[in-house]
Amino acid sequence: MSILSAQHLYKSFGVEDVLEDVGFTVKKGDRIGVVGSNGAGKSTLFKMIVGELAPDSGELAAAKDLTAGYLRQREHFPEDRTVFDTLKALGEETAARKGPLAGQTLAERFEEIHGYSFERAARGILTSLGFSGQAEDQLVGALSGGEKTRLALGVMLLREPDLMLLDEPTNHLDIKTLKWLEGYLAGYRGTLMIISHDRYFLDKCVNRIFEIENRRLTCYEGNYSTYKEKKQLRYEIDLKHYEQQAEEIKRQEELIARYKGRGTEKLVKRAQSREKRLAQVERLEKPVMLSETLKINFSEKLASGNDVVFAEGLSFAYPGAAPLFKNVGLDIKKHDRICLVGANGIGKTTLLKIILGQLRPTAGYVRLGQNVMPGYYDQEQKSLVSDNTVLEELHRIYFKYDQTDLRKILGSFLFRGDDVFKKVSDLAGGEKARLALLKLMMSGSNLLIFDEPTNHLDIAAKEVFEDAIMHFPGTVIIVSHDRYLLQHVPTAILELTEDGIVKYPGKYDYYEEKRASLGKGRLAENDATETRSEASEGLLGQRSGSTQNAGSAGTARSGAGAGRAVQNGPALTGADAYKAKKEASAAARRAAKQLETAEKAVQDAEQKIADLETELCKPEVFGDPEKAVQTAKQLEEAKAALDDAYWRWMELQ
C-alpha cells in the first residue's frame, strides 16, 4: 500500500535549481536509503515531505492520518531539562497521537498501546544510546553535539511515527551503538527513509535506494551494494545504447552525404527523405558518471624515522573524576595505518590530544620519534576561524601562495567561483570538512591524525579520501566508527578500553570475529585455568601423598620438607572453594549459551522477514490477493516475533 507519492516535483533556491521533475512512490514497510552528493537536495526533499518547505511545482500526496517524524542533523532541545525528562516529554507524543482514553494518563495510554511501560522503553533506548545511570540526569545544555544527536535519535525512536525520516543518524555513534541501531531498525514496523553516507549501515538497513543526482531522482531496488552494481550496469547499458545510436547516426549521415554527392535527382530525394527521418530521431545524451570529486593527495615534506609514536603507562583523568583510561601503551611504526576504536566517552579524542601534546597525561609518558611532524584533523573543526572567508582561511596559514594558486587548489576541493568568498561560519558540515582536509593536505605532515574524518563527507568523497590514505607514504592514526573504512584502510585496529589498549592486527572483519569469540574465549580460558588448577592440585596431592607415605615408612625428612607438606594440605581440602568456582564457571557458560540462543532467535526472525518480503515481491504472490494477504499477515507476525526476540536479547546484555 502506498503511503507517500510525488509527481513532477520542482524546487529551486534563487537561481539555483535543486530538484527537477522528481517522482517516486513509498509503500508501507519500505526501507529506503537516500543517497547523493552534499548539496544534491536530500535534506530539501525530507523538508518537503514533512511540510517545512513547499515545492515550487508538482504534487506530493500522503496517506490520510500518516504521522511522520524527522531527525535532522542538528536538533534543539530546552537546555534546562534533563536527558530523561526531554525524552519523556517528547516521547509521550506517541500516546498523545493515539489519544488517551477517559481517565488515562499519556504514559498509561502508551503502556496499553505497546504492552510495556513507558519508562522501561525510554530507559532501554537511553541505555542503548549510551545514556545510563547518572547520564540520564544530565542537563541537555551540558551535552556535546554528538550526545545531543543521540538524544534526538532516542526521541525519534520512542515516538515511533508511521514514516521515520532520518538524516545522517549514524553520526557520533560508536560501533556498539551502530549495531544496536541496526537491530532496532530491523524490527521497526513503520516505514524508513534514511539519508546516510554510511555504506555499511545502508547495506544492513535498506531495501531500496533513492539516488539524487543532477537534480533528478532515480530509484533502485536493493541495498547499497546492489545499487552500486545496478548503477554501474545501467551506465554500461546506457553508454552502449548511446554509442550504437551515435554509430548509426554517423552511418546515416555518411550515406546522405554520398547520395547528395552523386547528384542524381533520385538519390537526392532519397537523401532528403533520410534527413527527415534522422531529424525526428530523439538523440540520446551521453551518460556520465559523476566525476566531480575531491582530488586528495597526502604527501610528506620529510620522512620520519621508523619509530613514530611510543607510549607507556598512559592514564588520564579530569580533576575530581575517575580515570577515562589507564595503562595505555603504544608502539606505532612508520607506514602503520592505525584505526582507533572504542565506546563513546572512553577518551579516544583525549588520547589523540595527548599524542599531539595538547593534553598532559595523569600518568605515563608519550614520545614521538625522530623527524615526526604530526598533523591533526579535528572533527569539530575548531582550527577554522569562523569570520574568515574560505580563501582567507587558507591564506592565513599558507601566506606564501598567491591568491591565484590558492583558488586553483581550492577548486580541486570543489570550492569554485564565489564559493571561495563564503564565510567559514556559513559553510555546511561537508564543506567545513573539505576545507579542514585541504589545510592538512597542504601541511606536508608525515604523521596524519584524524578524528572522525568521514562524518560529513559524501560517499564519493569518502572513497577518494580512503584511496589517498592508502597511498600516503607516512603514518596514519584514525579515530573512526566508519566500518567500511575500517574494513579497507587499517593495518591494525586498536580498541581503547578503561584498562588499556587491545590490538587486533587486521581489518574490521578480523576485529569483529575476534571480539565475537572473546566471550567464548574467556569461557575457554576459564576452563583451561580450571584444568590447569585441577592438574596442579592433583600433582600437589601426589607430592603430598608421597611425602606422607614416605613419612609413615620412616623416611627421613627435613623440617623444611615437612613444612611444605603442611602448606600443601589446604589445596587438598578446599572442596568448597573449588565447588563454588565450578558453579560460577557453569553459570557463566549457561548465560553465554542463553545469549547465543537469543542472538540466534533474532537472526532467524530477521531471515524469516527477509524471506517473506522476497516472497511478497514475486508476481505469483502480489498478483494473487489471497496469497498476498496471507503472506502479509505472516510478515506482520514475523515482525512481532522479532520484537519479542530483540527485547529478550536486550535483557540478556
Image (cartoon, rainbow, N blue to C red):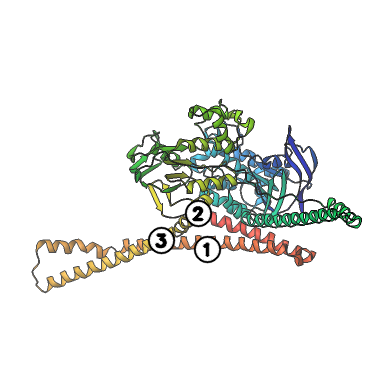
Which residue occupies the foreground of this view, 641 or 129? 129
Label 2 vs 3, first from the N-terminus: 3
State the residue position of label 2.
653
- Circle 2/circle 3 CB separation < 8 Å: no
Q: Secondary structure at mark 2?
A: loop
Label 1 vs 3, first from the N-terminus: 3
Q: CA distance from mark 2 to mark 3?
A: 18 Å
- Circle 1/circle 3 CB separation < 8 Å: no
Point out the residue furthest to the front here: 263
The amino acid marked with disc number 1 is Thr
Which residue occupies the foreground of this view, 496 or 231? 231
State the residue position of label 3.
521
Left or right for 14, reference 645: right
Is residue 104 visible in the rendered structure shown here?
no
Q: Secondary structure at mark 3?
A: helix
How busy is the neighbourhood of tag 2: few (under 14 within 10 Å), some, or many (20 plus)?
few
Query: Residue 597 bears which disc, if any?
Result: 1
